Amino acid sequence: MSSRPARRGPYAKGVARREEALVVALEVLATNGLRHSTLQDIATRVGLTRAGLLHYFGSREELLVAVLRARYERDTEEARARVVPGQPLAERVVTEVLRQHRSPGLVRLDMAMAAEATDHTHPAHDYFLERSRHLEQTYVSGVTREIEAARIDARVDPLIAARQVNALIDGLHVHWLIDPSLDVRAILTDGLQRILPTAPHRAG
């Protein structure tokens, strides 16, 4: 048998360093926002040069996409862990949006990158398209279950409703960033009630 050691040390170290950089980037962007965060700030906190940081991500845009992806994956896992059996979809949506607003820097990054990603050649385009479709399917499943449970009006089209919920949330993010005095809970609750009306009570 060969006694050569597995050549995984440097690779594993590189993966760990990249993950560390992502964690730091999330913290820096959440605290300072996109305009007041620099690659040098992140690199210094990780103990790297700016060039060293870019070695793991390729470009500033790729780093930002990686941050958004990591944040989305983290938020999705945490949201699943908070699910209460029988909790209405609309209530869960409100809870998660309000939690996102605890980190305005990341919401601002998300909206700024989403606008840039409307250019199909932008590095973030595929990520936002993938995320939009994932959220869409999540909402379609939730709406379908609540229609079957006679909680949401059966006349609601799950796919159209899912896309309306996505649009409502994104639009509200932008308006809240411009005017933080908005009552997000009230606006979102009212909008969701209009998109996902309660099933009418059966007569008799």
Image: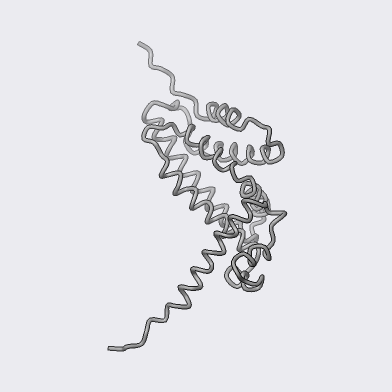
Q: Residue 123: image x %, image y %?
A: 62, 61
| The residue positioned farthest toward the left in the image shown | 1
Instruction: Please tell me in which quadrant of the rendered image residue 80 appears.
Output: top left
Against 82, residue 41 (above or below) is below
Q: Residue 169: image x %, image y %?
A: 59, 39
Q: Is 139 in front, or is 28?
A: 28
Q: Is 25 in front, or is 70?
A: 25
Q: Is residue 199 left or right of residue 117?
A: left
- Residue drawn at point x = 47 percent, y = 36 percent: 92
Q: Residue 60: image x %, image y %?
A: 66, 64
Instruction: Please tell me in which quadrant of the rendered image residue 203 appears.
Output: top left
Against 33, residue 6 (above or below) is below
- Residue drawn at point x = 32 percent, y = 88 percent: 3
Against 12, residue 100 (above or below) is above
Way the structure is coloured: one colour
- Quadrant of the image for the C terminus? top left
Q: Residue 128: image x %, image y %?
A: 57, 52
| The residue positioned farthest toward the top in the image shown | 204
Instruction: Please tell me in which quadrant of the rendered image residue 121 appears.
Output: bottom right
What count of labels does the image hold?
0
Q: Is residue 64 left or right of residue 147?
A: right
- Residue drawn at point x = 58 percent, y = 56 percent: 26
- Quadrant of the image for the N terminus? bottom left
